Image (tube, coloured by chain):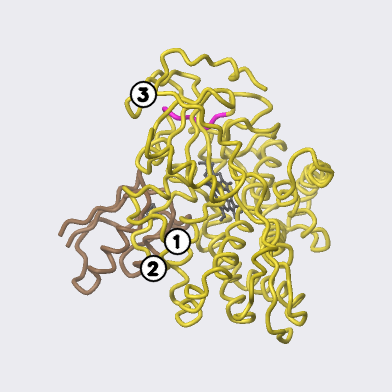
């Protein structure tokens, strides 16, 4: 591991052996975070290299917003600084960059993922959702992770980028395959190999777009100028990589969460069928209750006191979206799922400057998928024993398998 | 009722606009650029709900 491993506990207190990497189920992870937040909202854990853990809603929001004290900048050349104990990973741009360099790098994506830009994608999102459901609707049975929540965000994102359609699904499912299978398995290794291939393809496509522009996001990124200069090739690559790595499996996980939830809670399903207008508030509640990105991390830049704890420059901080979203001080009765919860200022897309620029696209993909499932297979029955969760819920939560049966319908 | 938006705090979630499209104005990137001012009485409830939906607490309401 890295040099942070050496961080001695010193005067850091309170301390507790909190190991986020043992979280191997959603319920287990939720319970561990609830217990931690109740006992010690801010605490030092010597495990996983040593880090502070922040679990209360207000504290999580403060850490996210105060980028000057809690930096996202890469500190280890090989490992991400925005997750704890991360595997080797290329630099995430703009996520691992702080202002002032952050601003123009964020703007590239803010322009092509703005609410208006996303509204223009609506017909394409509807097309891909319809196309995807058409592939299984006559069968009367499906595995909705593989057949719906994985392909829709993959196809939408890759088409938006400007990827060749034949390769879209296979390219974007890399991250799902790596999350679905534990490290060390042949399936995970195959995912990692395809990841290398994908990086090479991104690079080639960007070079091609510089000389042969098209009407797509790859072109917008390849030809984006800051102060009259094109972005360096490796930065452009990293930005594209973030939209695939950060935008696809997260949207998949949110869609899967809602499908499992609606399978287990027929009352909520019926209310959404009867009143489709509830989808807006329901979407925020799905995001709050099932945050796809469960934790992030930051690095302290100057000695400071936070939550009554002495923090030192260089200390790592684990911030928990899931713990914040379940904080009773911010969400009355947090364990109950309420389709009409309002207000619902969850932190599932983050808050502060790095908050997710893909949120508008993710919401559109999610709402379209759920609306069409409820319209075309409203009576789906979940095979509860066949449901498989991701093996680890420390950073990203999600589902590997969601088998269902339903009354077959016609293709459209 | 008066509203004002702290444009430094706004990070462009655009949730305020989703809830109160008749009250708030977004720029082309989705950031709230509504000028401070009075809210028409029939829009007060929209404005209140829009402000409550902002995860950055960037919208201030003075009743
Ligand atoms: C439900 C789906 C999604 C969830 C839950 C999600 C979650 C998040 C969160 C929590 C952050 C903040 C990270 C931090 O503060 O360190 C973030 C940042 C980011 N997300 Fe998403 N995301 C989703 C979809 C997307 C999509 C669809 C895209 C792009 C197409 C995307 C691209 C990004 C990028 C580029 C950043 C970094 C922004 C910056 O540093 O300024 N995300 N996302
Ligand atoms: S909800 Fe808040 S942060 Fe988002 S655009 Fe509106 S004012 Fe800005």
Q: Is residue A344 above or below residue B11?
A: below
Q: Which mark is residue A183?
A: none
- Quarter holding residue A43: top left
The quadrant the C terminus of chain A occupies is bottom right
Q: Name the spot of residue A393 as percent of width and height, x first.
A: 60, 45
- Quarter holding residue A165: bottom right
Q: Are marks 3 and 1 in contact (CB under 8 Å)?
A: no
- The secondary structure that most of the magenta stretch takes on is loop
**Inter-mark Cα distance, 1 to 2:** 8 Å
- On the same chain, marks 1 and 2? The answer is yes
Q: Secondary structure at mark 1?
A: helix
- Left or right of residue A148, residue A98 in this image: left
User: Mark 2 sits on what residue?
Assistant: A340
Q: Name the spot of residue A67 as percent of width and height, x first.
A: 44, 33
Q: Which residues are magenta?
A: A69-73
In front here: A34 or A165?
Answer: A34
**Inter-mark Cα distance, 3 to 1:** 32 Å
Q: Which mark is residue A309?
A: 3
Q: Are marks 1 and 2 in contact (CB under 8 Å)?
A: yes
Query: Which chain is drawn using yellow?
Result: A
Q: Residue at x 47, y 71 (%)?
A: A279
Q: Secondary structure at mark 2?
A: loop
Q: Secondary structure at mark 3?
A: strand
In front here: A35 or A370?
Answer: A35
- Quarter holding residue A388: bottom right
- On the same chain, marks 3 and 1? The answer is yes
Q: Residue at x 73, y 43 (%)?
A: A182
- Left or right of residue A33, residue A135 in this image: right
Query: Which chain is drawn using brown?
Result: B
Q: Which mark is residue A285?
A: 1
């Amino acid at each position: 591991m890295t040099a942070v491993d050496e961080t001695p506990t010193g005067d850091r207190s309170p301390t507790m052996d909190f190991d986020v990497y043992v979280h191997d189920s959603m319920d287990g992870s939720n319970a561990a975070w609830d217990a931690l937040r109740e006992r010690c909202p801010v605490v030092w854990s010597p495990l996983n290299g040593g880090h502070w853990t922040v679990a209360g809603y207000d504290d999580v929001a403060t850490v996210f917003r105060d980028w000057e004290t809690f930096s996202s900048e890469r500190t280890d050349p090989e490992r991400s600084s925005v997750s704890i104990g991360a595997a080797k990973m290329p630099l995430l741009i703009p996520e691992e960059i702080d202002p002032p360099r952050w601003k123009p790098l964020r703007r590239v994506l803010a322009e092509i993922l703005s609410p208006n830009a996303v509204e223009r994608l609506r017909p394409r999102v509807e097309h891909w959702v319809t196309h995807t459901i058409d592939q299984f609707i006559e069968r009367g049975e499906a595995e909705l992770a593989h057949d719906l929540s994985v392909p829709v965000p993959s196809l939408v994102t890759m088409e938006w980028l400007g990827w060749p359609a034949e390769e879209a699904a296979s390219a974007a499912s890399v991250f799902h395959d790596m999350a679905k299978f534990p490290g060390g398995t042949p399936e995970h290794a195959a995912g990692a190999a395809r990841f290398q291939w994908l990086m090479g393809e991104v690079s080639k496509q960007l070079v091609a777009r510089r000389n042969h522009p098209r009407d797509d996001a790859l072109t917008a990124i390849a030809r984006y100028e800051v102060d009259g200069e094109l972005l360096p090739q490796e930065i452009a690559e990293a930005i594209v990589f973030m939209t695939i790595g950060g935008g696809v499996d997260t949207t998949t996980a949110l869609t899967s969460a809602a499908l499992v939830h609606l399978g287990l809670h027929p009352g909520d399903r019926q209310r959404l069928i009867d009143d489709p207008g509830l989808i807006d508030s329901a979407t925020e509640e799905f995001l709050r209750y099932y945050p796809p990105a469960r934790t992030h991390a930051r690095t302290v830049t100057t000695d400071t006191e936070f939550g009554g704890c002495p923090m030192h420059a260089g200390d790592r901080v684990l911030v928990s979206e899931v713990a914040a979203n379940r904080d009773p001080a911010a969400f009355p009765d947090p364990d109950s799922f309420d389709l009409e919860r309002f207000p619902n200022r969850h932190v599932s897309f983050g808050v502060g400057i790095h908050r997710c620029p893909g949120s508008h696209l993710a919401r559109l993909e999610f709402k379209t998928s759920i609306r069409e499932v409820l319209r075309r297979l409203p009576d789906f029955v979940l095979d509860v024993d066949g449901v498989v969760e991701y093996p680890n819920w420390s950073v990203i939560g999600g589902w590997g398998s969601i088998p269902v049966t339903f009354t077959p319908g016609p293709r459209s | 009722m008066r509203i004002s938006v702290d444009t430094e705090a706004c990070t462009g979630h655009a949730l305020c606009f989703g809830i109160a499209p008749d009250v708030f104005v977004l720029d082309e990137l989705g950031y709230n650029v509504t000028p401070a001012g009075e809210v028409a009485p029939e829009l007060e409830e929209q404005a209140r709900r829009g402000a409550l939906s902002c995860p950055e607490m960037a919208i201030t309401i003075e009743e």
